Amino acid sequence: MSPTTETVVLLDDDGARIGTADKASVHTADTQLHLAFSCHVIDSEGRLLMTRRALSKKTWPGVWTNSVCGHPGPDESFEDAIRRRAEFELGLTVTDVELVLPDFRYRAVDASGIVENEICPVYTARTCDVPLPNPDEVMDVAWIRPEDLHHVVAVAHWALSPWLVEHAADLSLAMLAGDAAAPAPPPAGRP
């Protein structure tokens, strides 16, 4: 299974759109800055979906990462791109797509020498579906508690994607779990 040809949005250093390119030609040893997204999918029990990238992936094969990553098309909203990739990679319908880290940007070099160079806002989304991974994209999935994400990053960062390691520190448990993990406001009249 493979998607139709994907087009990515190229960016200048300030994040302004400067053109487009075929996704297959963008990721090289000198990857131009481009637009992407990462999304953490949360189930009805408040668990986060982690995915392990297929061994056939061009970059970071076999590493664990957040639920869904991808690139919005030139005329596609982030929300629509997240829904498209969640369905394609995991067979999931997602709702409540929410931007949690609007300014995340990273550059990382894979062991093969291929560079990721992305402005990559981070989102959360919700699902009630059971994942049905596309084997061309995802080789394994695991549901974890939000509070376990920071522990996994601390003890096994080498087994995770660099973008997850970099942005996990900026994610709060309240962002990941939604209202269920957010602290209750203090009673009226108390600090």
Image (cartoon, rainbow, N blue to C red):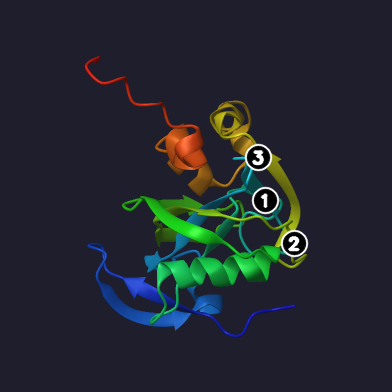
Which residue type does callout 2 highlight? Pro
Element carrying mark 2: loop
- Is 73 placed above or below 41 here? below
Earlier residue among tags 3 and 2:
2
Q: For the residue marked with disc 1, what is the amino acid?
A: Thr
- Which residue was labeled with disc 2? 133
Q: In the image, 44: left or right of 184?
A: right
Q: Position of residue 8 (x, y in %)?
A: 44, 76
> Residue 10, relative to residue 30: is it above or below?
below
For marks 3 and 1, the one nearer the N-term is: 1
| SS category of the residue bearing label 1 | strand
Crowding at mark 3 (Cα within 10 Å: few <14, some 14-19, many 20+):
some
Q: Which mark is residue 159?
A: 3
Q: Which residue is mark 1?
A: 51
Residue 99 visible within the image: yes
Q: Are marks 1 and 2 in contact (CB under 8 Å)?
A: yes
Mark 3 → mark 1, Cα distance in angstroms = 12 Å
